[in-house]
Amino acid sequence: MIRYLLGRLLQAVVVLWAAFTVTFVVLYLLPSDPVAIQLGAAGIETDSLSPQQLAAAKAQYGLDRPVLEQYWTLLTGVLHGDFGTSIAKHVPVSQLIGDRIGATLLLSAIAGVLAVGLGTTLAYLAAFVRTRALRLLLDRLPALGVAIPTFLVGLALIQFFSFQLGWVPSTGSGGWQYLILPVITMALPAAAQLAQVLGRSFHDTLREQYIVTARAKGLSRGQVQLRHAFRNAALPALTIVGVLVGVTVTSAIVVETVFNRNGIGRLAQESVLVKDVPVVQAIVVLAATGFVLVNLLVDLLYPLLDPRITHTATVEGG
């Protein structure tokens, strides 16, 4: 187990380094001038500057140094928790993220709980309901949820519940009322994906021999479903839960933009538009960190659901 954890931690470090490096390299591989991009984010048009003014602007933002030196400076800063200064807003990146991450974490946490509850309930009903027409409907609903774009779901909810019924606010940040529509918008696509995987896993698990044996022993339908089928069918769904964390940042960008919420997703959208590279790099590394940690936790939970799964290395011929 210790060897496994060390290996996964090393893998996590490599993934985070790769996420940071790719974000940095893309800036210099794009068919444009990286200096002009970053100075443009600061509101400086290079075409209007004299050579002396351009040189002074480059020196101010550290763009006069070699690319590798800039990369190393940024990387060592990240290792110390310093992501630099926002070019567009002229404040530390860590301060920008600190001011907005709370709203996104709250939104994501509530949406995650709702997605797991809705996806699990829908998959369970689709697998075990006895009415054929209802079962067919429940089987088809997740595909519909996956197919509809997130922004369209958000706009439809705003139109119906805010503009027509007037039950909840349409946009903005505030009390719990402002969370209802964004949470539903973020949770529905994730719940649909989870229901697809879990529903298929339920159907496959019910055909296993140990389920037939459990029924033959006289166990009730509920006992077979909860004690045997559900626990084993949850393994593939647990993997999907880990993968869905990687989609959270994308969902947050869409949801926070549609509902005009001040969170990390909205900050990412704003930073991309103005090409504020330090902020974009920080958000990419932050998202990669969350993805790596959640997937490591998922791997550690596997043996609790299925004791046959271990993280110990097997010795051939032993």
Image (tube, rainbow, N blue to C red):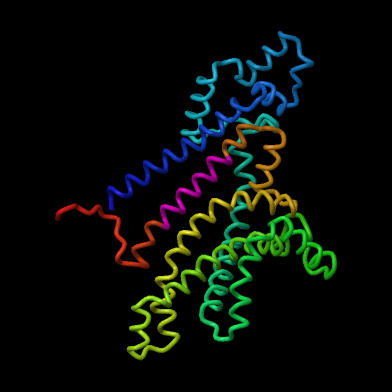
Residue at the image point whose x is 74% and y is 53% from the top: 258
The answer to which of 288 and 206 lies nearer the viewer is: 206
Q: Residue 44 lies in magenta, yes or no?
A: no
User: Magenta part of the protein: which range?
Assistant: 283-298
Q: Quadrant of residue 115?
A: bottom right
Q: Position of residue 84 (x, y in %)?
A: 58, 30
Q: Quadrant of residue 177?
A: bottom right
The answer to which of 122 and 273 lies nearer the viewer is: 122
Q: Residue 289 lies in magenta, yes or no?
A: yes
Residue at the image point whose x is 83% and y is 68% from the top: 166
Q: Quadrant of residue 27?
A: top right
Residue at the image point whose x is 54% and y is 73% from the top: 123
Whether residue 218 is situated above or below residue 57 in the rendered picture: below
Quick check: 30 left or right of 204? right
Residue at the image point whose x is 29% and y is 59% from the top: 310
The answer to which of 253 and 28 lies nearer the viewer is: 28
Q: Specify the farthest residue to the left.
A: 318
Q: Specify the farthest residue to the right.
A: 164
Q: Position of residue 193 (x, y in %)?
A: 57, 62
Q: Position of residue 289 (x, y in %)?
A: 49, 45
